[in-house]
Amino acid sequence: MSGLQALLSHSGVHSGTSSPVSRTDSPIDIDGLSWPSIGTRARRDETQEQKQARIDKIAGAVRVILENLGEDPDREGLLKTPDRYAKALMFFSKGYEENISDVVNDALFEEDHDEMVIVKDVDVFSLCEHHLVPFTGKISIGYIPNRRVIGLSKLARLAEMFSRRLQVQERMTKQLAMALMELLKPQGVAVVMEARQVLDKEPHNP
């Protein structure tokens, strides 16, 4: 799984299309959370009891999966697997609970600088929304400032936030580019990602 997704020029035109990015496409909503998973905002404000109930529900579903694979979820090696997997899945999708404003944390600065800023080869890990299997890769981010810059570490943090969701590579790079366009209003933004999915081929359908 590899490819390129970029947002270029101050017009905000997404590569491969001819229409400009509109405000309705913005990844930053009024509370700083991001599309397309509006309903997951509930996770951000959950109590510990509600979070545990969510984990228990996922664990119950994993137990059913194990049974239908022909396994015995009560055997020693699998006894705690449903709970472990549920907690791991919550961790791998923690980007649903994160807020762009919190990630940036006021690390935006006025600066008379117009040379390209580039952060290369940021490691990312995500889950493919089609098969729920991991994909990993590296992402490089560049932008040309328009009197506003962001702390370099925040670029990697934003990439991590978008990656810790059920994703496809094309949307993740688009979301990151759009977020930077929204935050910085730069002269241009480019996001390049190379990734590889654990499941290289579609499962065989007899």
Image (spheres, helix red, strand yellow):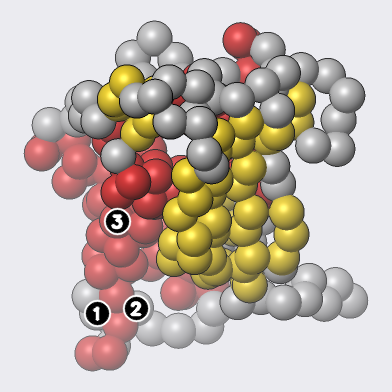
Which of 202/98 is in front?
A: 98
**Residue identifier under label 2:** 73
Instruction: Report helix, strand or loop for mark 2.
Output: loop
Q: Which of marks 3 and 2 is nearer the N terminus?
A: 2
Q: Which of marks 3 and 1 is nearer the N terminus?
A: 1
Amino acid, disc 2: Pro
At x 86%, y 30%, the residue is 17
- The alpha-carbon separation of the residues under discs 3 and 1 comes to 20 Å
At x 18%, y 35%, the residue is 50
Q: Position of residue 143 (x, y in %)?
A: 54, 38
Quadrant position of residue 177: top right
**Residue identifier under label 1:** 79
- The alpha-carbon separation of the residues under discs 3 and 2 comes to 22 Å
Residue 33 visible somewhere in the drawing: no
* Residue 91: assigned label: 3
Q: Image check: 35 left or right of 93?
A: right
